[in-house]
């Protein structure tokens, strides 16, 4: 089984906003022997939105969140960095940009997905990304094409 780290917005998002796209991508990849790894498997939510400030010493401190995310980037085969155009007065996900940088600096592959032309055209984000795409379905097709050849029974010719 191959793994894909699902980097994307969390802070300021509702549970659905943070999780729905990750579930969608993971469900599309699973039949191809590719597991989506979500940072939200451990991160607590209190109230209506993820705030980034938690009273959980195991998983909710800044150090714990950063350490787990770095662990995920190092241990996954590839990173999908989803940086959509912010809505409702929110901002781009700084954590996702950090995870994209981390992926690049350890020489792993990353796919950047954004519907924001400023993000897609940013020279540094482009340099850190093997591919820059506009939507998640394009990314899923690409990821299956790249990783499925490494999965037992996957398409390789």
Image (cartoon, rainbow, N blue to C red):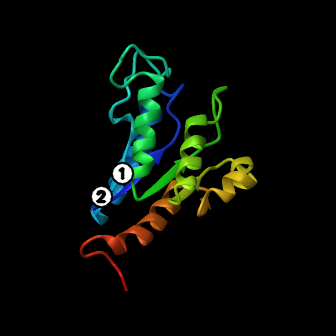
Is the Cβ of the residue at disc 2 closer than 8 Å to that at disc 1? yes
Q: Quadrant of the C terminus?
A: bottom left
The picture places residue 74, in percent across and down from the top left corner, at 43, 50
Asked which quadrant contains residue 156, the reply is bottom left
- Label 2: which secondary element: helix
147 left or right of 80?
left
Q: Quadrant of the N terminus?
A: bottom left
Question: Who's the residue at 29% across and 70% down the image?
Answer: 151
Q: Can you tell which of label 2 and label 1 is closer to the viewer?
A: 1
Q: Is residue 60 above or below residue 141?
A: above
Question: Who's the residue at 24% across and 76% down the image?
Answer: 153
The picture places residue 84, in percent across and down from the top left corner, at 60, 43
The picture places residue 140, in percent across and down from the top left corner, at 45, 61
Q: Which mark, by number, is residue 36?
A: 1
Q: Which residue is mark 2?
A: 30
Mark 1 crowd level (few <14, some 14–19, many ≥20, 10 Å Cα): many
77 and 25: which is toward the camera: 77
Q: Is residue 19 visible?
A: no
Asked which quadrant contains residue 22, the reply is top left
């Amino acid at each position: 089984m191959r793994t894909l780290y699902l980097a994307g917005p969390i802070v300021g998002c509702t549970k659905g906003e943070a999780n729905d796209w990750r579930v969608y991508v993971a469900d599309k990849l699973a039949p191809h022997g590719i597991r989506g790894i979500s940072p939200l498997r451990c991160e607590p939510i209190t109230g209506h939105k993820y705030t980034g400030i938690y009273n959980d010493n195991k998983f909710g401190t800044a150090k714990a969140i950063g350490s787990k995310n770095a662990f995920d980037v190092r241990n996954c085969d590839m990173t999908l960095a989803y940086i959509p155009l912010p809505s409702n007065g929110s901002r781009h996900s700084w954590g996702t940009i950090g995870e994209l940088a981390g992926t690049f600096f350890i020489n792993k592959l990353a796919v950047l997905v954004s519907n924001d032309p400023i993000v897609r055209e940013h020279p540094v984000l482009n340099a850190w990304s093997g591919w820059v795409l506009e939507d998640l379905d394009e990314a899923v097709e690409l990821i299956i094409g790249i990783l499925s050849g490494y999965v037992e029974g996957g398409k390789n010719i």
